[in-house]
């Protein structure tokens, strides 16, 4: 299926976006997770676009082909929400359905909570937020400072070739098929004067300075007025308070796809597509 690449300025950064089935009347905006990229949705997007949806996926700041933050900048959840806030009017001019995976799901939840009536349906794919940090907030910030110091001293580690990139990707996601792995490796890397490099900002390799609070996040979830579908992998990720977070959503249900891990959109695109299509169609 044909896909169109576009670039949009949002929050001062040039964002890369993909569009499948641009003529579709209902738009599904897909938001990827940490160290992922928009192209990762291709198997899933082709399925739901063939069923009639207009599908848009974009690279978050510092990921894929979207610009990195400038000198002195960093990456916080509030930045992602502001990016999505400014992108949404150009990504969809009509009815919009929102899907977020992992980190993208957290950002989508914060967006939906602060934009009542905008999102027609919300789908969270293993996207109910990270674990709550249990330590002292000063220790968390000190860990961040140390990780940034180490990153500034460290020489960039290059890739030997695409096969090396694929090997590293499959080390963290062993279930990833070889054909899709090579496709994503090509999209996630770029040739530089110093050789092949990942496209993502090396700052993403540092630890975040902020302390994630499940209590605060549940308050945001309580403000989400869109019908919400949460999809979890049978071998995926769930926090200890998963049920409490799910229950905080006023109008939510959960589906489990057995036999897959965290990267559901890559590993079970057809099953996820069926669930999302049914969820979108249920909204009328």
Image (cartoon, grey):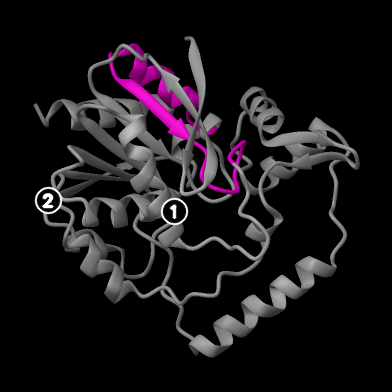
Q: Which residue is mark 2?
A: 251
Q: Which of these two is toward me, 34 or 64?
A: 64
* Left or right: 123, with 107 as reference point: left
Q: Which of these two is toward me, 180 or 99?
A: 99
Q: Position of residue 236 (x, y in %)?
A: 44, 51
Taking the spot 33% from the left edge, 72% from the top edge, the residue there is 214
* Residue lying furthest left: 284
Dot 1 crowding, Cα within 10 Å, few <14, some 14–19, many 20+: many
- Of mark 1 and mark 2, the one earlier in the sequence is 1
Q: Is residue 27 above or below residue 116?
A: above
Q: Which residues are magenta?
A: 40-66
Q: Which residue is mark 1?
A: 80
Q: Is residue 25 above or below residue 203?
A: above
* Element under disc 2: loop
Taking the spot 44% from the left edge, 53% from the top edge, the residue there is 80
Q: Is residue 46 above or below residue 184?
A: above
Q: Position of residue 255 (x, y in %)?
A: 26, 43
Q: Which of these two is toward me, 22 or 171?
A: 22
Taking the spot 80% from the left edge, 31% from the top edge, the residue there is 162
Of circles 1 and 2, the one toward us is: 1
Taking the spot 61% from the left edge, 26% from the top edge, the residue there is 180
Q: Quadrant of residue 191?
A: top right
* Element under disc 1: helix
Q: Which of these two is toward me, 72 or 211?
A: 72
Q: Position of residue 258 (x, y in %)?
A: 38, 40
């Amino acid at each position: 299926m044909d896909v169109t690449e576009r670039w949009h300025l949002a929050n001062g950064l040039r964002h890369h976006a993909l569009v499948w089935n641009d003529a579709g009347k209902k738009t599904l905006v897909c938001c990827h997770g940490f160290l992922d990229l928009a192209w990762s949705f291709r198997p899933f997007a082709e399925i739901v676009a063939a069923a009639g949806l207009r599908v848009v996926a974009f690279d978050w700041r510092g990921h894929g082909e979207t610009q990195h933050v400038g000198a002195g900048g960093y990456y916080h959840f509030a930045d992602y929400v502001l990016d999505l806030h400014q992108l949404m009017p150009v990504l969809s001019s009509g009815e919009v359905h929102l899907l977020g995976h992992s980190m993208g799901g957290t950002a989508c939840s914060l967006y939906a909570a602060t934009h009542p009536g905008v999102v027609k349906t919300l789908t969270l794919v293993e996207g109910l937020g990270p674990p709550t940090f249990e330590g002292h907030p000063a220790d968390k910030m000190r860990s961040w400072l140390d990780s940034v110091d180490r990153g500034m001293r460290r020489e960039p580690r290059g890739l030997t070739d695409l096969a090396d990139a694929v090997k590293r990707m499959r080390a963290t996601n062993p279930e990833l098929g070889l054909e899709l792995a090579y496709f994503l490796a090509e999209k996630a890397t770029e040739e530089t004067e110093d050789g092949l490099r990942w496209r993502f900002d090396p700052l993403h390799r540092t630890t975040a300075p902020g302390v994630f609070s499940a209590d605060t996040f549940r308050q945001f979830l309580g403000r989400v007025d869109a019908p919400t579908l949460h999809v979890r992998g049978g071998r995926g990720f769930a926090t200890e308070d998963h049920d409490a977070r799910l229950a905080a959503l006023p109008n939510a249900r959960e589906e489990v796809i057995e036999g897959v891990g965290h990267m559901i959109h890559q590993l079970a695109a057809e099953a996820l597509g069926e669930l999302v299509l049914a969820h979108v169609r249920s909204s009328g």
